[in-house]
Image (cartoon, rainbow, N blue to C red):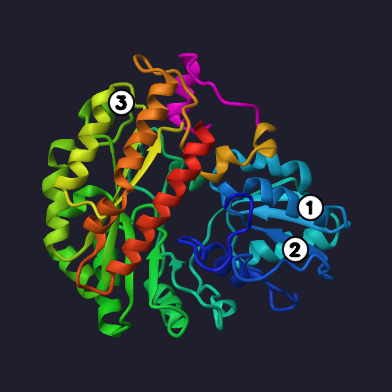
Amino acid sequence: MNGELVKGWSQANCSVDLPMLSATIPDRWEKEICNEYYDDINYNSSANVIILAAMTVDIKHAFNIMKSFKNQGKKVIFGGHQDSFSPTILSNVSDSYYIGTPSKEQMNSLLNDALHDTLRKIYNFGINIDFPFDYSFYKRKKVRYIQILSSLGCIYNCDYCWHQLSYGGGVKLRNINHVLSDLKALKGITRYFAFRDPNFYNKRSHTLELCDNIKNENFNFRWGAQCPIVIGRDDELLDKMFQAGCRLLFIGFESLDNRNLKSVNKPFDANQYKSLALNIRRHGINVAGYFMFGFDFDKNESYDKVYQFINEAKISLPVLNILTPVPGTKLFERMMDEKRIDYPDASTYLDSDFIYSIPCNKCYFIHPTMSKSAIENNFIKLHKKLTTYPEIIGRTIKMNPESFMLFKMNLDLRKDRKKMELAIH
């Protein structure tokens, strides 16, 4: 933030990537693990092989870390990336990178290749998540929030979404016993977690069984998950989720105009959004809503319509983005064919952090009726309106222990908005 490394508290400071990665390292290898939110990187490590996982927002920092180790003559690998930007940039300073999630056997093969100097540039491992993850290195850390996993992929195929590409277009459900093993490992580390599943509602029976098991274990966790809005019709499951400790659902509304939804193959009816969101609230579960601006049928009034909806549907955490056509998606290919894409060169990302430090805050395409500046300025204007202290307090301050977490998350949105204003203007 502001050019300084954020340490300690962050909404996503305990990604599932490190626990998943750590669990695949063979026992015969000595390993040291660093989550930079808590520990300083040991640039003097005697390790032969460096494996780095980083969020896309940290792309420039990741580049510099890898370059430092590469200059020491170490084998440098990065992986777990779900976007198509990172390989373009990081492959210049790495010996290899992998796509997907490796199994223990695949990781053993990768490390042997590194040891014998036979690394391939790219490994495609597919989806391997059926083993307990290793959260042990988070012990004795002041962890407020952590991610776990019960599935990968999504049953929907929205044109703007990268998940269908990054996970091979399918859905992988994780063995429930492994999920429960992870939750047992979290006891004593944190009381709060979130499922990182792209869609926690991929298979209803799996979600029901998981919630029943969590409830029966009496974990006393408080957690959230990402779901499609249609879960608002499922009263039985919403009850079970609440009983299991769910207090927040992240819902991708994206647009309130059905023409926009149809144009990107999102198979929902925006006319039902409010009633379904309110029904989720009636079951004691807060709703965080994702909204995107810049769809073909958006206009200036779309921003006011979203503001009104957020208040009427009682959205506890509104997350705004400008539509970003991600390379490889159907939306990107269509806009390329229409000669509407206006992306900077990949090297630009190494010169400035602004594009990535707050993702999806700039318009990189030509809109049919709105200028880029109109899309960006209306976006900032709405963001500013939603992040005043009265708005934040009105959405979050309730007589329950979860209100502080929501309050903090909304304050983070306020901080992000101030950074976005600098980035755009």
Query: How many numbered discs sit on the rendered protein?
Result: 3
| Dot placed on the residue nearer the N-terminal end, 1 or 3 | 1
- In the drawing, does residue 4 fall left or right of residue 259? right
Give me the residue at 42% from left, 39% from top.
Answer: 161
Q: Position of residue 173 (x, y in %)?
A: 39, 61
Q: CA distance from mark 1 to mark 3?
A: 42 Å
Please tell me in which quadrant of the rendered image residue 6 appears.
Answer: bottom right
Q: Are marks 1 and 2 in contact (CB under 8 Å)?
A: no
- In the drawing, does residue 14 fall left or right of residue 203? right
Read off the residue under disc 2: 111
Give me the residue at 61% from left, 70% from top.
Answer: 38
Looking at the image, residue 85 lies above or below residue 53? above
Looking at the image, residue 144 lies above or below residue 106? below
Q: Residues within 10 Å of mark 1 (few under 14, many from 20)?
A: some
Q: Position of residue 95 (x, y in %)?
A: 78, 49
| Dot placed on the residue nearer the N-terminal end, 3 or 2 | 2
Read off the residue under disc 1: 119
Read off the residue under disc 3: 263
Residue type, label 3: Ser
- SS at circle 3: helix
Residue type, label 1: Leu
Q: Residues within 10 Å of mark 2 (few under 14, many from 20)?
A: many
